[in-house]
Amino acid sequence: MAESVDAPDLKSVDFKVVGVQVSLLAFLYKLTSILKMKIFLDTADTELIQKYNETGLIDGITTNPTLIMKSGRDPEDVYQEIKDMGIRDISMEVVGSADEMIEEGVRLFEKFGFCSTIKVPMTRDGLMACSKLTDEGIRVNVTLIFAAAQAILAARAGAYYVSPFVGRLDDQSVAGLEVVRSISELYRIQGAPTQVLSASIRSVQRAVRSWYNGANVVTMPPSVFEQMYDHILTDKGLEIFDRDCETIKSNIG
Ligand code: E4P
């Protein structure tokens, strides 16, 4: 009878690449950042997630307590439904003291597995929870980031993602995209593996400019995703092509 094998502690696994010893966890972090221009949907509306996931272009979902509240559902039912759609990265927000966030984060990870990204706030407790959860091999998204200084601390705490809130900065007359640019540039200069996940996106322009400014991921409401492919000139052009197709058919028919 086969003996059960415990999952390896990724932090302690390392191997050699062209003679250089590297940590498996650091290697996996690098590998996942190779995929460029990742698109996440910022919603807990599973009908809309299902609709847009069918495009094959959705890399993950971010939720927060406000979005879950709007859905009127139990958060874990929402996460389960998203997981069942095959989505491999779901940000699940935890609240409370560092110990409470760690306990909840570990529980969610044990329940939902590798699709779970635990979202913690950019606070002292959030940073402590981030370090601990990262040590356990759990992906952490540090949210409510409004300055590069915060992003430095989050990266030091091992965050997999930091989420600068572009729209909320813009609301305060601070250029949100400039914060995305400074964090991305800073991580590039320092070689930090933490990914910049541009959040609080309210327009296609802000989404596109987030990638221009170095974001690895942009999370956006489904309406913004839809507007990314919707264009009046595309519709107009298609109308003419459809009409001409009909004319060709009647000419040869
Ligand atoms: C990020 O993950 C948040 O869920 C979200 O982007 C916040 O956006 P809002 O400022 O539009 O609420």
Image: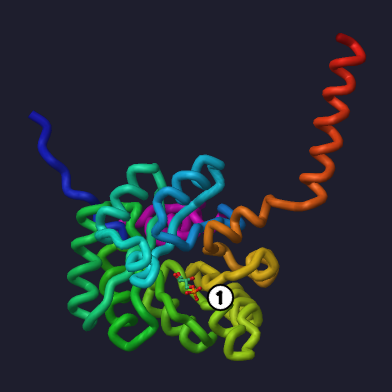
* Picture coordinates of residue 156, whole percent (x, y): 41, 79
Where is 150 relative to 166, above or below?
Answer: below
Q: Quadrant of residue 246?
A: top right
- Magenta-drawn segment: 11-34
Give the position of the N terminus as an image quadrant: top left
Left or right for 139, reference 167:
left
Identified at 57% across, 78% down, the residue is: 167
Total count of labels: 1
Asked whether residue 18 is drawn in magenta, I would say yes
In the rendered image, the residue lying farthest to the left is: 1
Horizontal side, residue 65 vs residue 189: left or right: left
Magenta span contains residue 102: no
Which of these two is toward me, 212 or 27?
A: 212
Q: Is residue 14 visible?
A: yes
Disc 1 element: helix
Query: Camera-side residue: 132 or 98?
Result: 98
Q: Residue at x 18, y 79 (%)?
A: 99
The image shows residue 41 at horizontal and vertical percentages of: 49, 58
Q: Amino acid at mark 1?
A: Tyr
Q: Locate residue 14, reporting x and y percent.
A: 35, 56
Name the residue that disc number 1 marks.
Answer: 187
Looking at the image, residue 11 sits to the left or right of residue 5; the answer is: right
Would you place residue 93 above or below residue 150 in this image? above
- Could you tell me which residue is drawn at 21 percent across and 54 percent down? 111
Q: Is residue 20 left or right of residue 202?
A: left
Which residue appears at 56% of the width and 56% of the height? 38
How crowded pointer 1 is (Cα within 10 Å; few <14, some 14-19, many 20+) is rated as many
The part of the image, by quadrant, that contains residue 65 is bottom left
